[in-house]
């Protein structure tokens, strides 16, 4: 592409989801706002056949918030969206009063968790 062309190359983010997941995992566990662990997905072959690792659509991280609510964190690379089964799972979790976070980065995940924590304590978020 020549300089001055009307077509610009789209910048591609090569960050891997597993790297974002690791950062979010560590940040939540160090924040004092919740405790999470990695939730394996898919199927694995065991001695008796195939075993479903977790429910279809479940978050990448699962755990509990500081106030004891179930916490699910679905992590996506920048620009990615939830799959339909993940949206269904989110709806189920919210129906049962769990905390569900859809995150593309650490800052967004912690901001959502802080917002929940402030609401529980009856405080308002100051911008």
Image (cartoon, grey):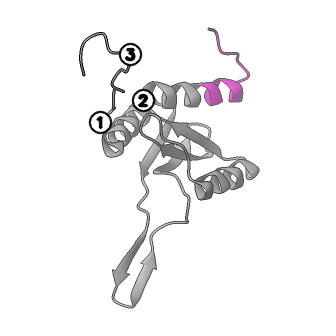
Dot 1 falls on a residue whose secondary structure is loop
Q: Label 1 to label 2, Cα distance in Å?
A: 16 Å
Q: Earlier in the sequence, mark 1 or mark 2?
A: 1
Q: Mark 1 = which residue?
A: 14
Extent of the magenta region: 115-127
Dot 2 falls on a residue whose secondary structure is helix
The one nearer the camera, 29 or 105, is 105
Dot 3 falls on a residue whose secondary structure is loop
In the rendered image, the vertical position of residue 7 relative to residue 46, given as above or below: above
| Residue appearing at x 56%, y 31% in the figure | 113
| Residue appearing at x 75%, y 51% in the figure | 95
Q: Mark 3 = which residue?
A: 6
- Report the number of numbered marks: 3
Q: Label 2 to label 3, Cα distance in Å?
A: 35 Å
The one nearer the camera, 7 or 100, is 7
Horizontal side, residue 22 vs residue 95: left or right: left
Horizontal side, residue 80 vs residue 47: left or right: right
Q: Position of residue 98 (x, y in %)?
A: 66, 47
Q: Quadrant of the C terminus?
A: top right
Q: Mark 2 = which residue?
A: 106
Q: Earlier in the sequence, mark 1 or mark 3?
A: 3
Q: Label 1 to label 3, Cα distance in Å?
A: 25 Å
Residue 123: quadrant of the picture: top right
Number of the front mark, 1 or 2: 1
| Residue appearing at x 62%, y 38% in the figure | 67
Residue count near mark 1 (Cα–Cα under 10 Å), binned few <14, some 14–19, many ≥20: few
In the rendered image, the vertical position of residue 45 relative to residue 10, given as above or below: below
Query: Does the magenta-highlighted stretch encompass residue 123?
Result: yes
Q: Position of residue 24 (x, y in %)?
A: 40, 36
Q: Position of residue 34 (x, y in %)?
A: 50, 38
Number of the front mark, 2 or 3: 3
Horizontal side, residue 51 vs residue 96: left or right: left
């Amino acid at each position: 592409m020549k300089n001055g062309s009307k077509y610009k190359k789209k910048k591609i983010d090569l960050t891997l989801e597993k790297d974002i997941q690791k950062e979010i995992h560590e940040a939540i566990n160090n924040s004092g706002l919740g405790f999470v662990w990695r939730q394996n997905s898919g199927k694995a072959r065991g001695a008796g056949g195939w075993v479903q690792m977790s429910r279809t659509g479940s978050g990448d991280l699962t755990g509990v918030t500081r106030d004891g609510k179930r916490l699910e964190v679905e992590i996506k690379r920048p620009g990615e969206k939830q799959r339909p089964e993940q949206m269904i799972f989110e709806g189920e979790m919210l129906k049962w009063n769990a905390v569900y976070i859809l995150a593309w980065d650490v800052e967004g995940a912690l901001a959502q968790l802080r917002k929940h924590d402030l609401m529980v304590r009856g405080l308002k978020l100051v911008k």
